[in-house]
């Protein structure tokens, strides 16, 4: 076969391409240039038997290759993350090391056998003792004989790796003989066996490898690097031309003269070649020019063929276009009329839709509603407001007055103002009764809802009527434009109809009227064009599509409407509220017309109470005397006790009536602030200041009180029973300066309880009563829950987790009530938190003679071995709701750990992590022991309490069936 040498491996081995594979190389080069840049890089371990596309490092063009080895290069202890691959360019025979990113997958149609083949000179082998210098010179010598030269090849044998053992001749020169004569190879006895020769070549390379101590392929650092990066053969010029000369393939980097230079070659045959070298080079130049011209001819022929194909395609396209035009012309009238009819149909639907939608009508009607139907403020309202303010000021003056003479004058002035107010109230009621407030309010609400459903929430509006004028002006211009467009459309359609009428006459054989057919038909195209343009213009005019300026006008008008609606609704609300207040004032004024409130009922009740108390004291004295009498009789004693019990009940009933009368007087004080001044002996202000708890009629001596000596370590504590309910009377020692403060704290606590009563989570306060003037004690009466404190329950029968969570939810509710009233408990511990019936948690009261800080610093703020005082209190900071929540967390922790041992951190907080408990409870406790603690409201929303049902109604204390001696609700 005839081949062209393209790469030399050693003195006896080279690669060559068959001269008939020129076109194959051209096609491969073009296909690779198109496919490889878009292909996927090699991923994972490469397949050594698969053909890939490789980007040659010298010209950055793509060639087919196979991976021979994967190299993980290490240098100076650093591992390069990018692995390298040694590849063989199978169509040219040369090899190099590439990054993995320069190797890509190629399509199956490019996975064809290699163009270049590997040849070995017949009957030659490399000497075993050949050094690297001789190896390189032999390689250069063979390259000068075969590289880019047309060689005759005669196959002799084929090695198992595909290498062809062959005899090579160039212009009647036996290349193998020349190599042997030059001393770069020697003849072998068994030329077909190349295994030993290969091993010898490897030995030569390995010797040098041991010298260089490098892990990369040897040829990378070789001085003849150009021989490995040699041109891909003379056919590469064809590929370069196909790529429009953007790249030139694997170029030859070493001049040919240098490649042929070999100082060590002194053989006679070589000397014979050199005289003909110049002639050979000239032939080679001419041969290359011839090849280039032939290749250029082929390229031009290919371009001509491509142009012929393009011309044929253009002819076919033109033919189809002509046929399409002819078909269109044949059916033009029908298509035109069908298109026009479809547009007319669409126009009818658009007009019908726009007619029903009433462009801008909703907003126009809304503007009309808020401008034309707007209610005005009643004339009497301003007058009423002024007189009412004067009336309130007169009431305040009476309330703050302490001079009797001045008081009467103020009352007289107040009565005059009240009479004027009564007249103004009647006037307002009459005027408002004539106004349709409810209907107008309902209309505005419906209007606002309907507009918001279309335009969304309104924003701040321009307080100017110019907004509405601008909207109506814009709407008028818009409608005029639409009317003009519709008029043009109607006129064009009418002209078309008249044209059809004229056409009909022209083609009516029975018609005697003659008409100019040319004139009628000649204007058809212009008429149809005008009709189509007019219809399209109207269809393109969408009333519901607006530019930014139009949207701004619409939204400004809408915001102004919403502003007016809300303003009028606010005015209606003010009128309605003042109307209701006026009706109530008129009703009260008529009730007390020509008469004054008095305390006669209260005095009558007090007189009755005083009489019953005297009888009760007499009976108590009689009972004491009878007990010491020698004529003691159990039967008579029983009768006396029954009389005493009956008198006590009657006294308590009258005291209840007295409290009811005080409540009535408290309400009247709002209208008649002079009552406490007119009747100071009634003690109305004292009752009001105590929040309705203070009673002067109830005395401790009148009750069947049993001293609680075991609980009276801090203050007098007695137990009694009122109307079947067990109660405790807790005595507080007060003086003139502290009495008012105690009453204030008690009243504030009671008002907090009174907001939600039984649902407040607080212990109810029943009465506040004073002893005799000689005894500086004030008693606070509270319900008695024997054995229900947390301390007593945990000592007797501890709560389960479910019971503890139910109880602590009630405690959290109590703390939320207190904190909402700006009250800090400061004394939350095991003896003043109660678990009624083991279900409902109640926060007990505290020592009302002490401040928050004094209560928090008490010795009782401890449970088991755990201090309930928060870290910030220990550092001197004041008590706060946060410190209450810390104590709450400690109580919950104490209930949950039961008998488990636990540690305490440096700051005094318990170590929750080491204790075994429910995960949700542990999470809650961690949030109660941190610096940024949860509030009582947040605790109630915690996952722990979502499934816990609170008990809404407090049970009667008597329901507790396990009495316990410990109850003191503050025990401080």
Image: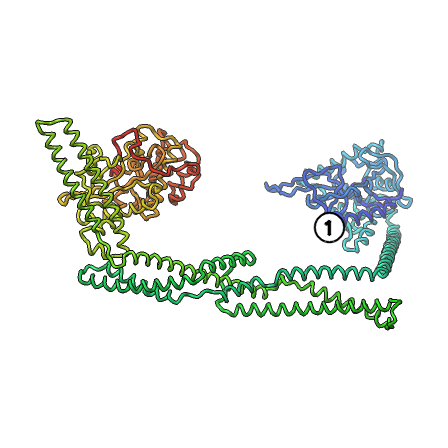
Q: Where is residue 501 shown, x and y percent of the image?
A: 81, 68
Location of mark 1 (residue): 60
The residue at the point 50 percent across, 59 percent down is 443
Query: Can residue 308 be seen?
Result: yes
Residue 581 quadrant: bottom left
Visual colour scheme: rainbow
The relative height of residue 673 versus residue 157 in the rendered view (above or below) is below
Q: Residue furthest right?
A: 172
Q: Residues within 10 Å of mark 1 (few under 14, many from 20)?
A: some
Would you say 928 lies left or right of 299 here? left
Which quadrant is home to the C terminus?
A: top left
Percent of width and height locating residue 467: 53, 68
For the N terminus, which image quadrant? top right
Q: Residue lying farthest left?
A: 630
> In front: 178, or 271?
178
Give whichever of 494, 21 is nearer the camera.
494
Q: Is residue 931 above or below residue 303?
A: above
Q: In the image, residue 14 lies at what x, y percent?
A: 81, 41
**Percent x, y for residue 487?**
69, 69
- Looking at the rendered structure, the secondary structure element under dot 1 is loop
Q: Is residue 285 visible?
A: no
Q: Is residue 248 above or below residue 159?
A: below
Q: Is 439 on the left or on the right of 314, as rendered?
A: left
Of 7 and 823, which appears nearest the observer? Answer: 823
In the image, what residue occupies the spot 61% across and 41% down? 79
The quadrant holding residue 705 is top left
């Amino acid at each position: 076969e005839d081949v062209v040498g393209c790469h030399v491996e050693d003195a006896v081995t080279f690669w060559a391409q068959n001269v008939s594979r020129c076109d194959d190389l051209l096609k491969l080069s073009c296909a690779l240039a198109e496919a490889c840049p878009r292909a996927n890089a090699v991923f994972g371990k490469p397949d050594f038997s698969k053909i890939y596309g490789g980007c040659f490092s010298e010209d950055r063009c793509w060639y087919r290759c196979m991976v021979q080895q994967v190299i993980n290069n290490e240098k100076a202890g650093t591992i390069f993350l990018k692995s390298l691959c040694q590849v063989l360019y199978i169509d040219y025979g040369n090899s190099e090391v590439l990054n993995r990113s320069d190797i890509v997958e190629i399509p199956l149609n490019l996975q064809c056998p290699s163009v270049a083949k590997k040849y070995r000179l017949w009957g030659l082998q490399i000497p075993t003792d050949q050094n690297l210098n001789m190896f390189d010179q032999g390689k250069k010598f063979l390259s000068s004989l075969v590289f880019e030269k047309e060689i005759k090849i005669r196959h002799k044998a084929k090695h198992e790796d595909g290498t062809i053992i062959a005899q090579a001749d160039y212009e009647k020169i036996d290349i193998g003989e020349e190599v042997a004569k030059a001393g770069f190879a020697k003849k072998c006895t068994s030329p077909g066996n190349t295994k030993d020769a290969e091993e010898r070549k490897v030995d030569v390379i390995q010797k040098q490898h041991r010298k260089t101590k490098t892990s990369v392929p040897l040829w990378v650092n070789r001085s003849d690097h150009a021989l490995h990066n040699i041109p891909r053969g003379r056919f590469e010029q064809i590929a370069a031309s196909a790529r429009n000369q953007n790249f030139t393939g694997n170029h030859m980097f070493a001049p040919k003269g240098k490649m042929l230079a070999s100082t060590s070659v002194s053989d006679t045959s070589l000397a014979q070649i050199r005289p003909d070298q110049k002639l050979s080079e000239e032939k080679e130049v001419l041969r290359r020019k011839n090849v280039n011209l032939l290749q250029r001819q082929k390229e031009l022929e290919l371009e001509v063929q491509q142009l012929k194909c393009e011309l044929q395609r253009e002819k076919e396209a033109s033919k189809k276009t002509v046929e399409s035009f002819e078909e269109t012309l044949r059916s033009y009238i029908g298509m035109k009329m069908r298109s026009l009819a479809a547009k007319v149909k669409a126009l009818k639907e658009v007009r019908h839709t726009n007619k029903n939608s009433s462009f801008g009508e909703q907003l126009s009607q809304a503007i009309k509603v808020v401008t034309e139907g707007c209610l005005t403020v009643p004339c009497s309202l301003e007058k009423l407001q002024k007189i009412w303010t004067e009336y309130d000021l007169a009431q305040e003056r009476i309330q703050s007055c302490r001079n009797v003479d001045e008081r009467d004058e103020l009352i007289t002035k107040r009565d005059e103002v009240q009479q004027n107010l009564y007249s103004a109230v009647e006037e307002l009621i009459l005027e408002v009764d004539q106004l349709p407030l409810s209907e107008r309010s309902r209309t505005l609400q419906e209007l606002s809802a309907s507009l918001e459903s279309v335009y969304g929430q309104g924003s701040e509006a321009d307080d100017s009527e110019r907004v509405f004028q601008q909207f109506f002006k814009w709407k008028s211009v818009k409608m005029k434009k639409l009317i003009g467009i519709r008029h043009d459309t109607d006129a064009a359609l009418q002209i078309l109809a008249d044209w059809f009428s004229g056409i009909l006459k022209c083609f009516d054989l029975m018609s005697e009227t003659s008409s100019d057919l040319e004139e009628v038909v000649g204007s058809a195209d212009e008429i149809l064009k005008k009709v189509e343009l007019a219809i399209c213009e109207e269809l393109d005019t969408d009333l519901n599509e607006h530019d930014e300026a139009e949207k701004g006008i619409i939204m400004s008008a809408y915001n102004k409407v919403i502003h007016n609606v809300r303003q009028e609704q606010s005015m209606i609300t003010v009128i309605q509220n003042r109307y209701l207040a006026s009706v109530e004032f008129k009703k009260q004024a008529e009730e007390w017309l020509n008469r004054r409130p008095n305390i006669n009922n209260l005095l009558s009740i007090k007189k009755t109470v005083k009489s019953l108390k005297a009888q009760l004291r007499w009976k108590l004295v009689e009972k004491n005397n009878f007990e010491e009498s020698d004529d003691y009789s159990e039967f008579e004693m029983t009768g006396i006790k029954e009389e005493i019990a009956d008198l006590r009940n009657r006294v308590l009933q009258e005291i209840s009536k007295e409290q009811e009368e005080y409540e009535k007087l408290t309400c009247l004080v709002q209208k008649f602030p002079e009552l406490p001044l007119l009747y100071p002996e009634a003690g109305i202000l004292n009752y009001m200041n105590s929040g309705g708890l203070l009673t002067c009629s109830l005395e401790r001596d009148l009750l069947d009180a049993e001293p609680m000596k075991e609980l009276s370590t801090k203050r007098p504590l007695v137990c009694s029973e009122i109307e079947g309910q067990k109660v405790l009377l807790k005595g507080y020692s007060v003086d003139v300066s502290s009495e008012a403060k105690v009453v204030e704290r008690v009243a504030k606590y009671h008002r907090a309880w009174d907001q939600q009563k039984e649902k407040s989570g607080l212990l109810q306060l029943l009465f506040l009563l004073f002893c005799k003037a000689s005894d500086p004690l004030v008693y606070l009466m509270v319900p008695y829950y024997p054995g229900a404190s947390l301390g007593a329950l945990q000592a007797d029968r501890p709560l389960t987790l479910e019971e503890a969570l139910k109880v602590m939810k009630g405690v959290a509710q109590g703390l939320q009530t207190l904190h909402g009233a700006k009250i800090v408990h400061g004394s939350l511990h095991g003896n003043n938190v109660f678990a009624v019936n083991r279900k409902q948690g109640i926060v007990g009261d505290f020592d009302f003679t002490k401040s928050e800080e004094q209560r928090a610093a008490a010795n009782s703020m401890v449970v088991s071995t755990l201090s309930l005082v928060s870290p910030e209190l220990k550092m001197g900071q004041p008590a706060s709701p946060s410190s209450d929540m810390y104590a709450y967390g400690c109580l919950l922790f104490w209930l949950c750990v039961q008998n488990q041992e636990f540690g305490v951190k440096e700051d005094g907080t318990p170590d929750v992590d080491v204790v075994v408990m429910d995960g949700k409870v542990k999470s809650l406790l961690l949030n109660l022991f941190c610096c940024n603690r949860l509030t009582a409201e947040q605790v109630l929303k915690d996952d722990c309490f979502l499934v816990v049902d609170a008990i809404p109604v407090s049970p009667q204390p008597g329901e507790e069936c396990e009495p316990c001696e410990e109850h003191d609700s503050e025990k401080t």
